[in-house]
């Protein structure tokens, strides 16, 4: 699996829902293992399908002190009014770390790789990672949540880096 980097059109496209999750559980087991491997190698905390060119609604999270988690066809049911600012990075935008404001809490409904539905209420870092990865499925990157001048600065910096 290869990580697609800022500049790839795929990162700005919407992922489509996974069909027949239960029937495809064998396939998902393999894909999910691959995603966790990429995550570990990149020392990341979350990875979404579009980042590896898989345009389907799936993402994984693996943060310290939490179990590795798989989210297929996720929907955000609720987010808190209260927000928090925290420095984010992304395996698809290497070397860029910026404060992003997001809701403190999120309630999400999804299916795991075995095709079992679940609902999860998360706060803190897990909530942030879920929202960041969910954005990827919508074709949204964390830099799209910044002001336009900030976003442009990063894009420019990144374009220079990519050339170097
Ligand atoms: Zn990301």
Image: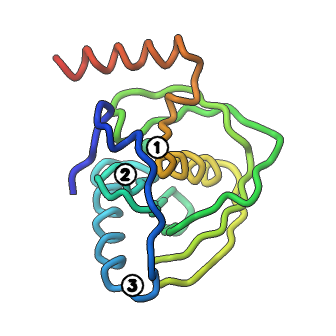
Q: Residue furthest left?
A: 164
Bin the neighbour count of mark 2 within 10 Å (Cα to Cα): few under 14, some 14-19, many 20 and up.
many
Give the quadrant of ligand 1: top left
Instruction: Give the residue number, with chain letter if any, for mark 1.
Output: 139
For residue 146, side relative to residue 35 (left or right) = right
Q: Position of residue 48 (x, y in %)?
A: 42, 54
> How many angstroms separate mark 1 from mark 2 (CA)?
8 Å
Label whose residue precedes the other's in the sequence (2 or 3): 3
Does residue 57 lie above or below 163 as drawn?
below
Give me the residue at 52% from left, 15% from top: 150
Instruction: Give the residue number, with chain letter if any, for mark 3.
Output: 25
For residue 145, side relative to residue 89 (left or right) = right
Give me the residue at 45% from left, 49% from top: 14
Camera-side residue of 154 and 12: 12
The answer to the question of whether label 1 and label 2 lie on touching residues, with beta carbons closer than 8 A, is yes
Bin the neighbour count of mark 1 within 10 Å (Cα to Cα): few under 14, some 14-19, many 20 and up.
some
Does residue 155 lie above or below 68 as drawn?
above
Residue 50 shows which numbered tag?
Answer: 2
């Amino acid at each position: 699996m290869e990580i697609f980097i800022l500049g790839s059109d795929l990162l700005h496209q919407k992922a489509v829902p996974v069909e027949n999750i239960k029937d495809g559980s064998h396939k998902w087991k393999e894909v999910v293992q691959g995603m966790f491997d990429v995550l570990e190698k990149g020392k990341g905390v979350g990875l979404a399908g579009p980042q590896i060119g898989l345009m389907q609604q799936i993402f994984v999270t693996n943060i310290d002190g939490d179990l590795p988690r798989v989210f297929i066809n996720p929907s955000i049911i609720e987010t808190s009014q209260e927000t928090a600012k925290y420095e984010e990075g992304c395996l698809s935008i290497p070397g860029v770390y910026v404060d992003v404001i997001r809701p403190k809490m999120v309630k999400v409904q999804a299916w795991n790789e075995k095709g079992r539905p679940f609902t999860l209420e998360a706060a803190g870092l897990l909530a942030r990672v879920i929202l960041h990865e969910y954005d990827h499925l919508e074709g949204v990157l964390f830099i799209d949540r910044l002001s336009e001048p900030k976003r442009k600065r990063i894009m420019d910096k990144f374009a220079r880096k990519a050339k170097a």
